[in-house]
Image (cartoon, rainbow, N blue to C red):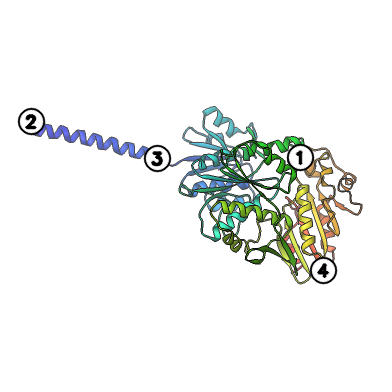
Amino acid sequence: MSEHSYLKSFDLKILKILAWFCIFEAYITDNSTMKIHFIAIGGSAMHNLAIALQQKGYQITGSDDTIHNPSKTRLANKGLLPDAFGWFPEKITTNLNAVILGMHAKKDNPELLKAQELGVKIYSYPEFLYEQSKDKTRVVIGGSHGKTTITSMILHVLNYHDREVDYMVGAQLEGFDTMVHLTQENEFIVLEGDEYLSSPIDMRPKFHLYKPNIALLSGIAWDHINVFPTFENYVAQFSIFTNSLTNGGIMVYNEEDLVLKDVVENSNHPIKKYPYNTPDYFIDNGITYLETPEGDLPLEIFGEHNLQNLAGAKWISQHMGIDEDEFFEAIASFKGASKRLEKIAENSSTVVFKDFAHSPSKVSATTTAVKNQYSNRTLLACLELHTYSSLNAEFLSEYKGALDKADKAVVFYSPHAVKIKQLEEVSATQIAKAFKREDLIIYTNPQEFKEFLFSQNLENTALLLMSSGNYGGLDFDEVKALVN
């Protein structure tokens, strides 16, 4: 072969190699972007995860049959709002890397059935979070009550000291753009550990899937009666969670909750156990002061349950590298998680709080906290029974004494909500009997409840509105105007 022919042949080989390299590089580039589809993208947790993954560089699509604000606006701002509401099986193709399935979807969802038919990988929300955090130190905050607040406290403290972590929390926090944040580089991820089910096709509680290195349990109070029909069955989920920690992991727990104390201390799982309880504090002129080694620290928050939350958050923060004095410095400016004892209006003689409380233990703790903080004022406590458990005739007796600390107590519930949830109809007599309070005021009509509320003399009053709903359409801006 002549030198010219050899060089020509060599050049052709080089060109072929370069061509194959370009094709391979294009393939890698095209496939390096994960393509994720969300079934039921409009949920509070789901839409935040969708935004977080988009920010991470993933290609996101989604569907839902209805999406309300703030999810709708936030998705639209990120270009993630579906063009039309409904389920579209044609969106599910083998080009997807994964589908994330929300609890709002049903087992016979057309998109889910298509994904199952095509063999596309299907994750529940907690499953996917675990996949994203397998190489991180996972910190999981669980318990029947207080988990959102404790998670929020920890993130507030870390943010105050410029400590970067990944996270998932159940409320919008001041200073944070999203409720979910995921990166490649952060060492820690802080997860709020919900005990409710993972997805329509995965009946495990969400917090069973995270396998934490560090965990906290705030307490056990029976909830989700539709899923856990007995108290014993509900408690068992917390035992499973305790035993799901990695070997040598850390469990921080509220030892004042005797059921929880029994669960953790009787576990034979090889973990380190750190109990906490209510720290020393006092109330002076409407301000709660925490007694610390550095002196009395005024707090923005109040209530014994919140002080227990603070004690737990301190332990977790210290296990994440925050010194005690650093924690106290930061927690002084914590104003609370959204919808958790949120002060929405105040003047010289009246204060109005909005709270997410709906389970018996939360209602009791929140009502007691407000009465103790404003002991010289009349406490008007209004509770909407809105969840499946709270509207269940068998569960109602759990509310015995929950509103006893209120000077005037009101319960609102919608018979329409009972029908939607396909529950046995409950009567005003049943509710009055359950709360064991003869002077309990009960409303089932939203307009009548509003007229009652707006007719009250709120002078020298603390008004507490507790609900996971909105009292049949109550405009809270109008409520604020009552005292402004």
User: How many numbered circles does the render carry?
Assistant: 4
Mark 4 element type: loop
Q: Is there CB contact under 8 Å for labels 4 and 3?
A: no
Q: Which of labels 4 and 3 is toward the front?
A: 4
Q: Name the residue under label 3.
A: 30
Q: Give the residue type at disc 4.
A: Asn
Q: What element carries label 2?
A: loop
In the drawing, does residue 39 fall left or right of residue 26? right
Spot occupied by residue 328 in the image (x, y as percentages of width and height): 61, 62
Going by the image, does 428 lie left or right of 88?
right
How many residues crowd mark 4 within 10 Å: few (<14), some (14–19), many (20+)? some
The residue closer to the viewer here, 219 or 398, is: 219
Mark 3: which amino acid? Asp
Residue 116, x across and y down, in percent: 56, 29
Q: How far apart are marks 3 and 2 (CA)?
A: 42 Å
Q: Residue 289 occupies which quadrant of the picture? A: bottom right
- Mark nearer the N terminus (1 vs 3): 3
Judging by the rendered image, the residue that carries numbered circle 1 is 421
Residue 16 in view, yes or no: yes
The kind of residue tagged 1 is Lys
Q: Can residue 482 be seen in this view?
A: no
Badge 3 density bin: few <14, some 14–19, many ≥20, Cα 10 Å: few
Q: How far apart in space, not on screen, are marks 2 and 4 (Cα)?
A: 105 Å
Task: Read off the residue under disc 4.
Answer: 460
Q: Which of marks 4 and 3 is nearer the N terminus?
A: 3
First in sequence: mark 2 vs mark 4: 2
What distance separates the C-alpha of mark 4 from that of mark 1?
Answer: 39 Å
